[in-house]
Amino acid sequence: MKIFFDFFSFSDPNVRYVILGMLLMGMGSATIGTFAFLRKRALTGDAIAHSVLPGVCLAFLLFNTRNLWVLLGGAFVTGWLSIVCVDLITKKTKLKSDAAIGITLSVFFGIGIVLLTYIQQTGNAAQSGLDHFLFGKAAAMSVSDIRTMGIVSTILILCVILFFKEFAAFSFDPDYAKTSGLPVQFIEMLLTTLTVLAVAVGIQAVGVVLMAAMLITPSAAAKYWTDNLKKMILLSILFSTLGGITGAYVSFANNKMPTGPWIVTMTSLIALLSILCAPKKGVIPKFIVRKNYKNKMLRENILKEFYHLEEKNPDKKYFTVSEILDEREMLSWNYKKGLRMLKGKHFLEKVNDNYFLTDAGREEGKRITRIHRLWEMYLTQQLNIATDHVHDDAEAIEHIITPEIEKKLIEMLNFPEKDPHEKTIPY
Amino acid sequence: MSDAFWIILTGSLVAITSGLLGCFLVLRKMAMVGDAISHAVLPGIALAFLVSGTKNSIPMLIGAAAFGMLCTVLIELFHKKAKLQEDASIGISFTWLFAIGVILITYFADAVDLDQECVLYGEIAFVNFETYLNIPTAVWLLGGMFVFVLALLIIGYKGLYLTTFDPDFAATIGVSVAAWHYVLMGAVSFTTVLSFESVGAILVVAFLIVPGATAYLLTHNLKWMLVLSALIGISAAVSGYFFAAAINASVSGAMVTMLGVFIVCAFLSSGIQLRRKNKLATQTE
């Protein structure tokens, strides 16, 4: 608990650096990641992330320093090279993009592992900590590292602000972007460059193995909350920073823990919550909306059947369940649920084993029947559809039509008395 | 027998077995699914390790298979139920499961004889530590897997062939496309798990995809492709071992590097062939 307060009171300057670093990483990777997500390039991100490892190792071997600028330079070169490889393989051979990505990421990573193990056995004192690039270590970030991350992140954000319109057009509809005269090739190159940069910035915190998740997972989570690109970017920055800080906290509290896997797990949890619970687009709210709608249809159908029964038997008011079921094919347990709901809403009352309509229920049944018959009338009169083809359509639309549309229909058809099947339209 | 022999044999067995299966993954455009499965089995391996306390055990296979299945189910759910695009569904599912696996391994590092290095590039150099009847246990297991995969390919050649190249036709003559899909995925999962200790969870992707892809560049005939992929796998294992020995680096990494060299060669030679063909075509015109 003490560590918790130490961490979240931000009193320790080290903690402040870590949090600042996470914020910078989140801003860079989530912003660019959103475009990668929109372009359906999640797995290309994975290829870039794995491919920066040999670059980091080579830069270290050549310059024998752990200066982040040097290592980022190496990462940038091989990250770019990997994209060129994927492009070459897909364009020049019969291999498809999935194989191209798989080949590139695994071979680059293999080379990286060879270099890394080679460096480790040389016993070079400066090499200690190079393996933090595999799974990340937030606590290993120094002030100068944070400064470097800050500069790169700022460049990233500035580029995105500057070219926002172009990026958006290109990501949503590359064909449109091309025909409207945008320099598509330049935009693509710039986006790729920025993606490589974003990966390079994040690897110190998250590590190369899981960096791809930081590009994709926050934006996938943000997608469930909004349709607006700007809001989506802001949200994914928020999610990625949240995941980053909680993940960094765990690794801060337990020194053995690598930061990357925790950040990814936390961010994935946010994504899972968003996918399940986000209002409107989440799985659960959508399920509830659907269920409510199904229940509404069930209720309205039953009321309509009652109205029909009353129409057919003008002197009868009370009906048994079997009589109702004779009127319309329906699962009996479903029907019971519907009857229960209607009783709750006081559209129906029950006496012994018989049901009867209340006034409000009759009004409602009448309304549904009216819309149904009006729609059949509309289809036959205005659209010239045969009378025996209109029932199913009306059956579906009767639950949707609003009072305003109903009014318009009535005016358009000029208060018809009978529907195409010679049944009275009740007003 | 020397260490070198066993290391090369282990590497070859991994390369051949996964290379043979990889041919079908490449042809079915499922290379990234192989990648996802090989990452996603990690938490299963870690948990099984923790429960049973031993490597190379039945629990490990079961645990890995369970998480391999979980990964495909997650991808399916995200994609179909939550309407998330497919690449993102794959990307989220396997990175998450892999992250959980790494956390488990780190957290229980004292209880489990596994570490992050093993996850990344395996322990093929120490293959001779655990032996049974003077033969490394890894060789027994991988040998068994190789025989199993070979038998599967010989017996099921027609089914795999048909469902790979023309699933519609296969379905019309009554060959179950889904069944062969799951047979292949199952074999891939098991091979990944058994190879895990030797080459790690990430490098196995290279063994799965690269030999098949290289062979695919060199031939149009499926049987030749399978034979070639096996030969490429063996050559990479042999040359990779000596490369690693020369610079004293990770053996499995060096084997993958050699695979990379081979595919670059295949790429260049197929490019030259293509150009020659084009030249001939323009000349005859």
Image: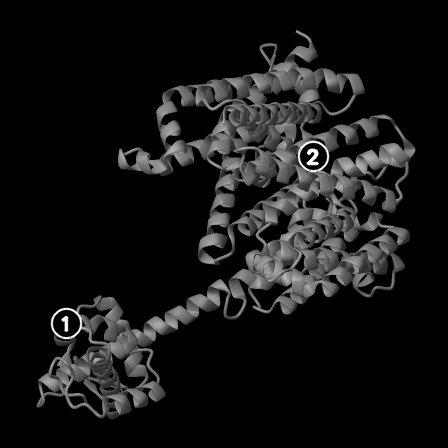
Residue B151 marker: none
Identify which amino acid the numbered label 1 is placed on. Answer: Asp
* Callouts 2 and 1 on one subunit: yes
Residue, disc 2:
A109
> In which quadrant of the rendered view does residue B229 lie?
top right
Disc 2 is attached to a residue of which chain?
A: A
- Seen in the picture, residue B263 relative to A219 is either above or below; the reply is above
> In which quadrant of the rendered view does residue A271 lie?
bottom right
Q: CA distance from mark 2 to mark 1?
A: 67 Å
Left or right of A111 on screen, residue A94: left
Counting every numbered tag in the picture gives 2
Residue, disc 1:
A388
Q: Quadrant of the C terminus of chain A?
A: bottom left
Measured as percent of width and height from the top left, residue A62 is found at 87, 33
Left or right of A33 on screen, residue B86: left
Measured as percent of width and height from the top left, residue B155 is found at 37, 21
Disc 1 is attached to a residue of which chain?
A: A
Residue at the image point whose x is 67% and y is 28% from the top: B122
Q: Earlier in the sequence, mark 2 or mark 1?
A: 2
Measured as percent of width and height from the top left, residue B192 is found at 55, 31
**Residue nearest the viewer, comparing B130 with B147:** B147
Identify which amino acid the numbered label 2 is placed on. Answer: Phe
Instruction: Evaluate whether residue B124 shows in this view.
Output: yes
Residue at the image point whose x is 66% and y is 62% from the top: A166
**Residue nearest the viewer, comparing B188 with A245:** B188
